[in-house]
Amino acid sequence: MITTKLTHSQLSLENAKNATEFGGKRFLGFTKKGAEVWISAYLNRETKEIKVQSTHNLSVLLEDGAELASRRVIVERNKTLYTDVQSVIASMRRDSGGRVSSRTLEHLDALMSQAQSKTGKGFIKQVPTNLFIRYVFESIFSGNTDSSEGGFRVIDIIKSWGFPEGEYYLINSNTSIT
C-alpha cells in the first residue's frame, strides 16, 4: 500500500474545500473606560454572506484615554482566548506588527461599510469578490495555519470556494470614522 503525504498547502486547501464557514476576530484596543474593542469577520460558503462587525463604534478608540492595540491579537471563529488580552500582548516575544493606528481604523471602517451595503466593486450581484474577501480577512483574520488540525487560510478559500473574481480596486478609506 502506497500512502502519499500531503504538503501543508495541499492539506490546508483540502480543509477549505470541506469547510462551510470561515471567520475570526482581531483585537483593536481599549475604550477610555477599559472595555475591549474587537472587530470580527465571517464568511458563509453556501449563502455567500460576508459579515464584518465590531463590538463598539470604532470612533471610541480615537477618544482621549482610549488605548490602541500595540500588537496583533487574533482569535479564530468559535474559539476562545483563555487569557486576558494584555497578558497575550505582553507574552509576545517580538513585535511582529499589527499595531493599530487611526489609519487602520479608517480602513476597517470602510471594509465594514462596504460589507454592510454589499455594493461597490467588492461585490457582484451582492456576492463578495475574491479581492474583497482577501481585503477583509487579511485585515482581520487571515486563517489558521495549523492544517493538521483542520486549519486553512483565506488564500485556500479564494482557490476553492468559487466566489467571483471581480475587478481590481483599492479600498477608499480616506473618510472619517462614523
Image: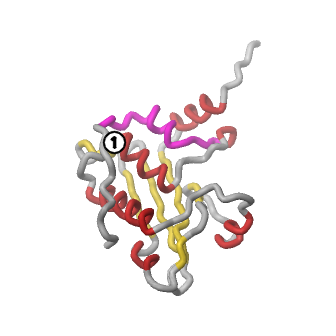
Q: Quadrant of residue 77?
A: bottom right
Q: Quadrant of the C terminus?
A: bottom left
- Number of numbered discs overlaid on the protein picture: 1
Position of residue 72 relative to residue 17, above or below, is: below
Q: Secondary structure at mark 1?
A: loop
Decide: is 77 above or below 46. below
Quick check: is 68 in the magenta stretch? no
Q: Position of residue 28 (x, y in %)?
A: 52, 68
Judged left or right of residue 134, residue 36 is: right
Q: Residue furthest right?
A: 1
Q: Position of residue 112 (x, y in %)?
A: 36, 61
Q: Residues within 10 Å of mark 1 (few under 14, many from 20)?
A: many
Q: Looking at the picture, which amino acid does disc 1 mark?
A: Thr
Image side of residue 69 versus residue 168, left or right:
right
The answer to which of 42 and 37 lies nearer the viewer is 37
Give the camera-side residue of 110 and 44.
Answer: 110
Residue beneath disc 1: 129
Q: State the residue at coordinates (26%, 58%).
A: 117
Up/down of 133 relative to 99, above or below: above
Which of 81/173 is in front? 173
**Residue 66 pos. (x, y %):** 51, 81
Q: Which residues are magenta?
A: 150-166
Q: Residue at x 28, y 37 (%)?
A: 167
What scheme was used to colour the molecule? secondary structure
Q: Is residue 147 left or right of residue 125?
A: right
Question: Can you say which quadrant of the picture contains the N terminus?
Answer: top right
> In which quarter of the view is residue 5 placed?
top right
Q: Residue furthest top?
A: 1
Q: Magenta stretch: residue 154 in it?
A: yes
